[in-house]
Amino acid sequence: MDDRNIAVVAIDGPSGSGKGTIAQQLASYLGWHLLDSGALYRLVAVAAQNSAVDLDNEAGLSRVAAGLDVRFVSKADGTEQIFLGQTDVACEVRTEETGKIASNIAAMPQVRVALMELQKRFRKAPGLVADGRDMGSVVFPDAPVKIFLTASPEERARRRHKQLKDKGIDVSLPALSADIAERDLRDTERAVAPLRPAPDAEILDTTDLSIDEVVEQVKKIVARTLADR
């Protein structure tokens, strides 16, 4: 089958917009494959540290990226598993420190090129739900469904704070707010694949919506768009 005939739902947005949670639930609902592209950059960070590759060594990091053996699993209870080889590294991948490193790595052109082909290989039948920052604008520009989720910086910081507290991680809300503001600036102003909606993306502000409400709206967008194909 021509890959272009395999439908992709591209869900993009800034940190804390809810795209990861929404993508997991949608992939489970549709029975499609899942790609968490942001986790790939985090995985490069984890794999590089495990291999003692300098985090400023773009060529070395690109080689790490090209050799990633990764698999995403969404369990029935809503929890995730992220396998690097045979090891579940989900907890390590989701730390704030790994996120900061990943944001810097994502601005490296050689790493982005190395991960491009890997990301495209996730496009398999019956379909793919891909979340990230440039899924609809760069990686899958032909995706029939493109959704850009956003929310106020304050709400995104509050969500992240609650998520970390629920995991028993103590972090201050002001520190998270500052980190999100810094990451937004870095992601929107970087020279390579800056964070912005694809021209044909549907923009959905989730600030005042619950997860269930966002999921229902996204399901309706997907059903409407795919019905028109």
Image: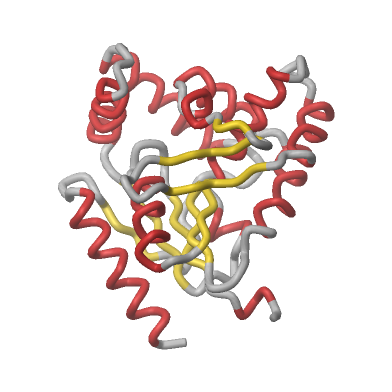
Task: Please state which of residues 192 and 11 is positioned toward the viewer in this rendering.
Answer: 11
Question: Which of the 4 image quadrants contains residue 146?
Answer: bottom left
Task: Please state which of residues 81 and 100 is positioned toward the viewer in this rendering.
Answer: 81
Task: Please state which of residues 133 and 167 is positioned toward the viewer in this rendering.
Answer: 167
Picture coordinates of residue 136, whole percent (x, y): 53, 60
Picture coordinates of residue 72, whole percent (x, y): 54, 46
User: Does 66 sit above or below residue 140?
Assistant: above
Label total for image: 0
Task: Please state which of residues 83 and 212 is positioned toward the viewer in this rendering.
Answer: 83
Picture coordinates of residue 185, whole percent (x, y): 47, 31
Residue pictured at 63% horizontal, 58% vertical:
122
In the rendered image, which quarter contains the N terminus? bottom right
Question: Which of the 4 image quadrants contains residue 175?
Answer: top left
Q: How is the image coloured?
A: secondary structure
Residue pictured at 52% horizontal, 60% vertical:
33
Question: Which of the 4 image quadrants contains residue 228?
Answer: bottom left
Picture coordinates of residue 169, whole percent (x, y): 33, 15
Residue pictured at 72% horizontal, 39% vertical:
68
Direction from residue 32 to residue 163 in the image, left or right: left
User: Does 86 sit above or below residue 98?
Assistant: below
Residue pictured at 48% horizontal, 60% vertical:
129
